[in-house]
Image: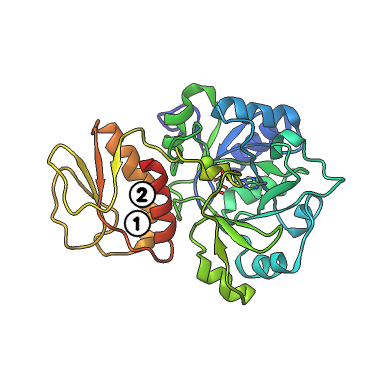
Amino acid sequence: MRNIYSNIFKVNNKNLSKAVNRLKKKQLIGVPTETVYGLAGNAYSEESVRKIYLLKKRPSKNPLIIHYLNLKQLKNDVELNSDFYKLYKKFCPGPITFVLKKKKNSLLPSIATANLKTVAVRVPRNKIVRKILKNLNFPLAIPSANKSTHVSPVSANDVVCEFGSSLKFILNGGSCIIGIESTVVDLTSKAKILRPGLIDPSDISKVLNKKITIYKGSKVIKAPGMLKKHYSPGIPIKLNQKKAKNNEAFIVFGKKYKKAKNIFNLSSKSNLNVAARNLYKILRLIKKKNYKMICVSPIPQTGIGLAINDRLTRAAK
Ligand code: TXA
Ligand code: MG
């Protein structure tokens, strides 16, 4: 049976081949990944990539992440180096994106990479998106399936909330297990993290056996995902709050908070992975409930907590 939304499709062989056919016809589809839901299109087709920018209302200077099935496919478009091989071996397929130099003979249209000489590449772990990639002879450009600056979607319904009937086909893979976007690491020179995620700086340092810097931003925008107003629920946010008024939504972390209508606990058991999984879901829920102010309790600045604080800080700008 189809879902209540006519553009959400359950995962079975018939719908997977529908998904593949749509992509071959240069149409866009919504797909689950282990991090967040994505808006997928043929990365080698300028027409498909244009459709992505248009639907997301994404500024053309913000490049896309190109998703591949494996190393063999990815090699066609980027120059690989030893840091890459080490990280790939340890973490892929998985929630990590590498910024690498674009190959001269790459088939990627320049619009996909915002005219940069670099490309962000990722090999996802989610079985559904992998099944699709397996049946294509091109990689997929897959940004998060939200309108530019909005919070990323973590369920098929969230994708419908973003695009309504303008996106005709979304595969329903349930809730995303990680719930926050991939770690983006720039390997074009000295390794640095452009966007924190589940794989944290110490995980990367251990593998590369050297200290890794976290990019803090400068006048030159390296990852436009680092732009100020991003991941925004469209409601003012105050961070590091000890309490909130009754008419304010209070996002908290840990067991010391009582249950109340306006209290939204990211993880009452103080589990940061659970908190990451709940973050965007809770931001959407608060928006739906029409709160006009969000307060957030302190969240530990460790592991995926770095990524949670990063997204909340951007949302608060
Ligand atoms: O987890 C994820 O990465 C999700 C899922 C769907 O795979 N995708 C995702 O894509 O978050 P998007 O487009 O929402 O975010 C891509 C980020 C942006 O911050 C973009 O600026 C950065 O990657 N990026 C892309 N290409 C880049 C490049 N060549 N150099 C630096 N940053 C780049
Ligand atoms: Mg995004």
Q: How did the renderer colour the structure?
A: rainbow
Whether residue 34 sits left or right of residue 141 in the image: it is left
Whether residue 256 sits left or right of residue 270 in the image: it is left
Residue 118 spot, x, y in % from top left? 73, 48
Q: Is residue 203 above or below residue 20?
A: below
- Look at mark 1 in the image and give the residue it sits on: 275
Q: Quadrant of the C terminus?
A: top left
Residue in the image at 57% along x and 44% along y:
219
Asked if disc 2 is less than 8 Å from ligand 1, the answer is: no
Whether residue 30 sits left or right of residue 23 in the image: it is left
Q: CA distance from mark 2 to mark 1?
A: 6 Å
Please identify the quarter of the rendering in which residue 293 is found. Answer: top left
Whether label 2 touches label 1, CB < 8 Å: yes
| Residue 11 visible in the displayed image | no
Please identify the quarter of the rendering in which residue 190 is found. Answer: bottom right
Q: Residues within 10 Å of mark 2 (few under 14, many from 20)?
A: many
Pick the front one: 153 or 221: 221
Residue in the image at 13% along x and 55% along y:
258
Pick the front one: 103 or 49: 103
Residue in the image at 42% along x and 35% along y:
157
Q: Quadrant of the N terminus?
A: top left
Pick the front one: 81 or 316: 316
Question: Is label 1 in a helix, a strand or a loop?
Answer: helix
Residue 205 spot, x, y in % from top left? 57, 72
The quadrant of the picture showing ligand 1 is top right
Q: Is residue 269 above or below residue 144?
A: below
Q: Amino acid at mark 1?
A: Ala
- Look at mark 2 in the image and give the residue it sits on: 279
Q: Amino acid at mark 2?
A: Leu
Pick the front one: 126 or 241: 241
